[in-house]
Image (spheres, rainbow, N blue to C red):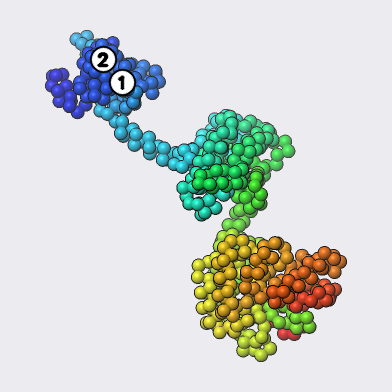
Amino acid sequence: MLDEIMYALDTTSIIAITDRRGVLTHVNDRFCETSRYSREELLGQTHAIVNSGYHPKEFFKEMWRVIGRGEVWKNEICNRTKDGDEYWVDTMIIPLLDERGKPARYVSIRSEETQRHIAEEQVRTLAYFDSVTGLANRESILGTIQATIAPGAAGSFSAFVTVSADELSVVNDAFGFETGDRLLVEAARRLQRVETHGARLGRIGSNTFGIILPNLGSDCRAAEAACLDLIERVLAELCGPVELGSGVVVDVSASVGYVLWTTPDLAAHVTAPGCPANEFIVTDDPHEVVKCSEIARKRARREGGQRRVQHFQQRMLNEAQDRVRLISELHRGIEKGELHLFSQPIVNRERSIIGEESLIRWFSSVLGTVAPDDFIPLAEQTGVIVEIGDWVLEEACRVLAEWSRDPARSDLTLSVNLSERQLRADGFGERVREIIERYGVRPGRLTFELTESVLHTDIDRTVGLLGMLRTEGVKSSLDDFGTGYSSLSYLQQLPVQQIKIDRSFVSSIVEDPQAAAIALAIVRLGRTFNLQVVAEGVETEDQFEKLRDLGVDAFQGFLFGHPRPISELLVGA
């Protein structure tokens, strides 16, 4: 019977028979082919000859306990060939019992599972490791945090640090993703050089790495000191020039955020002298840990500089939640018509109104009156400013169309602030052309005010777009002039017709000779380029007289009128 079974399995399975001690007494051809040992080399040996060392001793002790009782044992075994390659076999060992019911021989029937194991290992690698850097990926890092905060885990305070290599997006855009991947690999290599003493490093975002520092003890300040020590070493390794091949060298800067946390069951046992409750979090959610660290990192990045570090505090989460609420309400406010157009007059040297600057005001049914400084920067960051800007442009052209039917207002200009996002939006020039044609806005009545931020990228596109708008009768103005060098260097290229002296010079122009000298230089520059010069923020008669003496052409400020609904325009002063 055994011979018949052996014959049936011989061509499809790896067959071996041993005596009760495990010594091989029979092996089939498949065993020899797979192990790469000859039959003569195998017979008389035990299976130790193909032992790979992968399994612990307890694995085989359990196997012998099972088959020693006369029971069938099934499992997967990793073996090693004669020339050193590992291979996996799905194994079943059947004891053949003697007349006393004791095992006399053992038959092992195996099928090779190496390719399946390789595939499974590849899947595990994809699931838990980053394909570019080879580091643990986000899911793996979250699992490690979960293990750190699991009930019964040692320690009280732990820390999580997020680090971004901030040049990645620039490198991707300028040199391609292959070069960007080289930056990531080099950043990972440098971070791995930092001795972390039990910490774990992973890649958790496109340009962001995460480091877990578990079990830092129950003293909050000592835990923070250990975290800051690690951060200093991380920055020392990561920041600086990186050679990316083909002559590309990038000076890497980094943004770092970190959070201290403890679990609810351990919170009562921590000591936090001088460590307010808002400087650490109590949580058993790994996603919360990563989120808080990322909030701190993004705050650090917004602050600028090459080495930016920010400790998470609870107020940051509150502010982030307030930002989300604010942007949600802003979307709804736009839909409900809660935005209103206000304006402030611009007067000439005789104090006659020659134009208005349009200003946005938001009267929210939920939040009340929201200051522009609170929602405009958020709209810029999220891109909602494009939608708002389209609304303002539509409304401004509608107003200009109304003014054209009123002889007292038909010659007034209306200025509209233009954001960088609007200028970069696809089809912006075409939208402007369509709106001014639809409302029949006369040339010279609409002015776009730009700040220096629009000059920082793609100056050629900006010059081309402003030139096209000029042919449509739209004027351009440089706002806040004199606060940076960029506007001076680009003034000759830009097709603008107006510059506005920043209020920071106007506020001190009477008592500060330097402010007066700067204003005079701007006036002379305007004369050289045949530009109208407007002074912003004029609040006193002395300021007005001084600016007029310096040769300023037009003026704007509380002295001549506060912002008011555009329907309440004053004509004359």
> Would you place residue 134 above or below residue 365 in this image?
above
**Tag 1 secondary structure:** loop
* Residue 70 location, quadrant: top left
Task: Provide residue 16's location: percent of width, then percent of height.
Answer: 23, 19
Amino acid type at circle 1 is Lys
Residue reaching furthest front?
A: 247
Residue at 73 percent of width and 71 percent of height: 525
Helix, strand or loop for disc 2: helix
Q: With respect to residue 412, does 294 lie above or below? A: above
Task: Classify the position of the C terminus by image quarter.
Answer: bottom right
Direction from residue 460 to residue 92 in the image, left or right: left
Residue at far bottom of view: 407
Query: Which of the two residues, 559 or 535, is positioned nearer the viewer here?
Result: 535
In the picture as drawn, the residue positioned furthest to the top comes out as 100
Looking at the image, do the residues carrying marks 2 and 1 touch, with CB atoms under 8 Å apart?
yes
- Of the image marks 2 and 1, the number of the one nearer the N terminus: 2
Report x, y in % for residue 26. 21, 16
Regarding residue 344, the answer to whether it shows in the image is no
Residue on which the image places disc 1: 82
Q: Position of residue 448 (x, y in %)?
A: 62, 73
In the rendered image, residue 476, in percent from the top left (x then y), is placed at: 63, 74
* Residue, far right: 511
Q: Amino acid at mark 2?
A: Glu
To which quarter of the image does residue 272 belong?
top right
Judge by depth and name the residue closer to the eye, 155 or 12.
12
Residue 41: assigned label:
2
